[in-house]
Amino acid sequence: MIKFYILTLFPDMIIQGLHTSIIGRAVERGYISIEAIDIREYSKDKHFRVDDYPYGGGAGMVMQAAPVYQAYRALKERIGKKVRVIYMTPQGSVLSQKMVREFSQEEELIFLCGHYEGIDERALELIVTDTLSIGDYVLTGGELPAMVTIDAISRLVPGVLNNDVSAEFESFHDNLLEYPQYTRPEEYMGKRVPEILLSGHHANIEKWRREQAIIRTLERRPDLLEQACLTEKEQKFLEELKIKKKKDE
Ligand code: ADE
């Protein structure tokens, strides 16, 4: 069970986005909980303003420190213990499956989502423990990145996926991409399912899948192979693939 808390100006976006499909079911079944906290409710302004012009000038608006800090304080008091606060920003460490695995060990996590040109640095200094990016591109706010991260963490929580095996054997489990999948019919648009998958010979199928994973990783993400866990035989298979690839070039 992990409890996710999201400090945001757009709680509806989080709730609507995360209450469908597998994550929605995980909430219903009590494997995870998701609570979005509206930072605007902590504004002392009579119009509930939470942003202001940046000191020093420049384009856009900045989220003020006080509503962010107050929203955090109220939440922390309610939880009653110190919890990691993850600020979603393109300036953060880029999320990886390894980091997802680490976050999935926590009992509670707080996500802080910024908007506009960001949040007053003083609030960040006071509350943030981790800064996280979901990639080298800029989005309009931290909500989608927080949802991406929560999705990735949740699927590692026992019970969330129907079959625990697939959480483990997914892409990146041992730094290999996943093998190709097929379902019925056996032939589609003249393309047949690889015969070995119809053979019922489990050991051969397993071997074929591992080889396909290695081929795919070499083609699409060769950078991952350095960290991949391969048997001696698989290492040999990879070396042969590389030699063949060089010849073909
Ligand atoms: N906020 C805006 N862009 C982002 C990104 N790429 N990752 C995390 N938070 C963000």
Image (cartoon, rainbow, N blue to C red):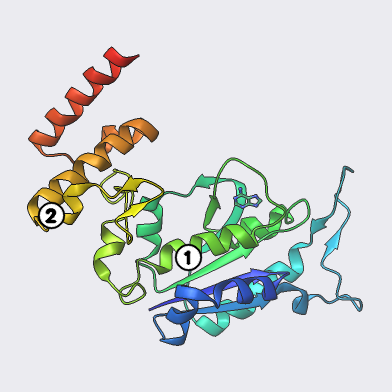
Residue that appears at 70% across and 68% down? 68
- Residue under numbered circle 2: 199
Q: Position of residue 188 (x, y in %)?
A: 38, 52
Q: Earlier in the sequence, mark 2 or mark 1?
A: 1
Mark 2 residue's CB less than 8 Å from ligand 1: no
Q: Amino acid at mark 2?
A: Ser
Compare residues 92 and 235 and report the one nearer the observer: 235
The image quadrant that residue 66 belongs to is bottom right
Q: Which label number is shown at residue 151?
A: 1
Residue that appears at 62% across and 51% down? 89
Q: Quadrant of the C terminus?
A: top left
In the displayed structure, 24 sits above or below 68; it is below
Q: Is residue 145 left or right of residue 119?
A: left
Q: Position of residue 11 (x, y in %)?
A: 68, 74
Q: Secondary structure at mark 2?
A: loop
Q: Quadrant of the N terminus?
A: bottom left
Q: Position of residue 40 (x, y in %)?
A: 77, 74
Q: Secondary structure at mark 1?
A: helix
Residue that appears at 76% across and 79% down? 41
Q: Amino acid at mark 1?
A: Asp
Neighbour class for label 1 at 10 Å: few (<14), some, many (≥20)?
some
Residue that appears at 27% across and 35% down? 215
